[in-house]
Image: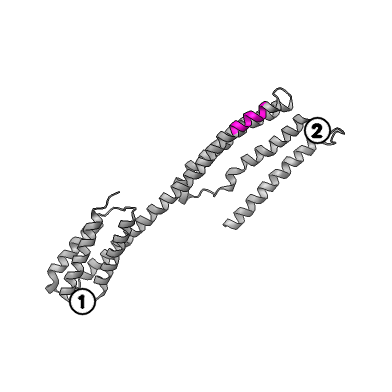
Amino acid sequence: MNSKQLNLFRILLFVGGLVLVGIGFLIFNYPLPEKGLSAAQKFFWVEMVLCYLVFFIPFFFNSITAKMLDTKLIPTMNIWFGVIFFEIVAIPLAFLALNEIVSIRVSVFIELVIFIIAAIFIYFGYLAGNHIGKVQAREDLSLSKIAELKSSFEMLNLKTDMWNDDLRNQKEQIKKLCDDVRYLSPVDTEMSAKLEMKLIVAANVLAESSISPSEMDSKILELTNFLNQRKLLRK
């Protein structure tokens, strides 16, 4: 089921729930009394609609998939906790007010307090979800950049095997650099991203170009400087 189909299903489910509440209203109140519904009855059915709307809030958030389970599970649980907390208090109060055991004013006041508390849980759940998602996205980008960097140096290492013996010193220097790159850890900073990109570009130039030994020494020195700077960066 793609996103459009899922959104359509959510809308149909939401409308279907409202229709079900309306059918319940007609079943319990038809025919309507000549004087209309009492204040307690009106309050009860308004509460039923409100409780349904609150209950449906989590369905408007993105679905949890296996890929995003670690970033979505806890925030969604937080949202559901706020919703269930509100429902547990609001529904009994609606029945108590309908039977005039608790006054409507007291019920409204208690529900407002509970609604604010539940809204705080929902808000922080949504906020936490966005924050975790952004952190995860940055970490994924950092990991992909490290993988690309290591791949470039592996290609460079393979390229050195085809160099002649006159470049033995250069080959040893590059193999040492390749060994150092293997042990680099991801760092999520703007500086690390810039240095990694410079290393990738320099490694690709050195691997793909036919350059003189003097130019090669210059490029190796450049790689060494960039790599030393990158090694100083830590999480």
Q: Write down the residue under mark 2.
A: 37
- The answer to which of 97 and 70 lies nearer the viewer is 97
Q: Quadrant of the N terminus?
A: bottom right
Q: Residues within 10 Å of mark 1 (few under 14, many from 20)?
A: few
Q: Residue 189, percent across and down?
A: 33, 54
With respect to residue 170, does 56 lie above or below? Answer: above
Q: Residue 14, percent across and down?
A: 66, 47
Based on the picture, tell me whether residue 107 belongs to the magenta stretch: yes
Q: Write down the residue under mark 1.
A: 211
Q: Residue 55, percent across and down?
A: 62, 40
Report the residue at 86% width, 32% height from top: 35
Where disc 2 sits, the SS reads: loop
Callouts 2 and 1 close, C-beta under 8 Å: no
Q: Is residue 138 left or right of residue 201?
A: right
For marks 2 and 1 on the same chain, the one whose residue lies earlier in the sequence:
2
Kind of residue indicated by mark 1:
Ile
Report the residue at 23% width, 66% height from top: 157
Based on the picture, tell me whether residue 42 belongs to the magenta stretch: no
